[in-house]
Image (cartoon, helix red, strand yellow):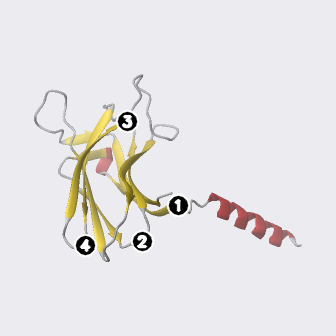
Amino acid sequence: MTMAKYLFCFLSIVLFVSCDSSIVKSEYKTTPDGSWDKDNILEFQIAALDSTQQYDIFINLRNDEKYAFSNIFLIAELQYPDGASVKDTLEYEMTLPDGNWLGKGSGSIKESKLWYKENITLPLEGVYNLKISHAMRKSGRVEGIIDLEGITDVGYQIEKHN
């Protein structure tokens, strides 16, 4: 075998092993200047998937050291192609009690993969819309935080349920 064939075989194996076949779709949107405005509802369009397959849906967040809270409140709405929707208010822990981040990553950016829907089917043909906004407020305050600093990216990930 020539050197080119060895290299091709090696790269093919690396590519095959490194692919995560359970991930079906994934997308991120960046917040302007690492600050998430409370009125900035991030929308993602999800084209219909295999209606017989069960999926797990995650909300993915990237934050930096400017994020000043140990948790986060989100409002997520999944709109079906027929106009029906399911809206949830969600709370996630972002740090351990000692203040260390729960997310993965090195350096100043941490990525958190947060459970949203488990073992769900998307039975209708058409486009589903996922809307995500934050619902953070300071303790004891009624009004929400206008600009939530430290959230740099918001996204979702759909995986095949195992």
> Dots 1 and 3: beta carbons under 8 Å?
no
* Mark 3 residue element: loop
Disc 4: which residue: 81
156 left or right of 6 in image: left
Name the quadrant containing residue 12: bottom right
**Mark nearer the viewer, 2 or 4:** 2
CA gap, disc 2 and disc 3: 34 Å
CA gap, disc 2 and disc 4: 16 Å
For residue 52, which numbered disc appears in the image? Answer: 2
Residue located farthest toward the right when viewing the structure as drawn: 1
121 left or right of 107 in image: left
> Dots 2 and 1: beta carbons under 8 Å?
no
Q: Earlier in the sequence, mark 1 or mark 3?
A: 1
Disc 1: which residue: 22
For residue 94, which numbered disc appears in the image? Answer: 3
Q: Earlier in the sequence, mark 3 or mark 4?
A: 4
* Mark 1 residue element: loop
CA gap, disc 4 and disc 1: 24 Å
